[in-house]
Amino acid sequence: MTTTAPIVDSRVIGLAHYAARAVLERVLAPYGVTFQQSVTLRLVAVADGPTGRDTLADGVVGAVKADASDAHGTIDELIAAGLLAEEEPAHIRITDAGRELYTKVSAETGAVAARIYDGISDEDRAVAGRVLTLVTERANAELTTPKK
């Protein structure tokens, strides 16, 4: 266990991200669902109703920095798997099977997250949340500026 806290930087953030993502992928594997599929499914599951296909794809692009064509491909995969359904005109909704999967995965990842965050104070989590939100905002801004 680390006793000296490192200063937050891209490496520390990346290590935390990849560790957490590996945990999620371990939960998803038995269901045959990929990380990007789980992100896409979640966006529809937490929406207040059917979501426009392009809006959903934009959400995936924003969340995982995927290419728009990859995001649309992931939507198609989830439709083919019966986890999402496309309604006219180009609106995506979660199916009963998709909702069931989302609920199971959420419960499993929630239990793992509780173990991971156990003993970390709310104050420390709030500070980390503020710092990581600011880093995300600044990194996203960098992605929208022309490369020098």
Image (cartoon, rainbow, N blue to C red):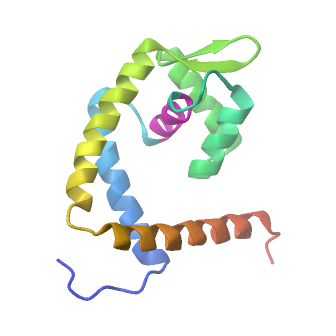
- Up-down relation of residue 1 to residue 29 (above or below): below
The residue positioned farthest toward the front in the image shown: 123
Is residue 91 found left or right of 74 in the rendered image?
right
- Up-down relation of residue 59 to residue 83 (above or below): below
Q: Residue at x 58, y 30 (%)?
A: 47
Q: Quadrant of residue 15?
A: bottom left
Q: Quadrant of residue 56?
A: top right
Q: Residue at x 64, y 50 (%)?
A: 62
Is residue 90 found left or right of 126 in the rendered image?
right
Q: Quadrant of residue 2?
A: bottom left
Q: Which residues are magenta?
A: 36-44
Q: Residue at x 56, y 29 (%)?
A: 44
Examine the residues drawn in magenta and state their main secondary structure.
Answer: helix
Q: Residue at x 20, y 66 (%)?
A: 119
| Camera sees residue 32 | no
Residue 88 at x, y percent in the picture: 73, 10
Q: Nearer the viewer, residue 47 or 31?
A: 47
The residue positioned farthest toward the top in the image shown: 88
Number of numbered discs on residues: 0
- Up-down relation of residue 4 to residue 37 (above or below): below
Is residue 46 found left or right of 70 in the rendered image?
left
Which quadrant is home to the N terminus?
bottom left
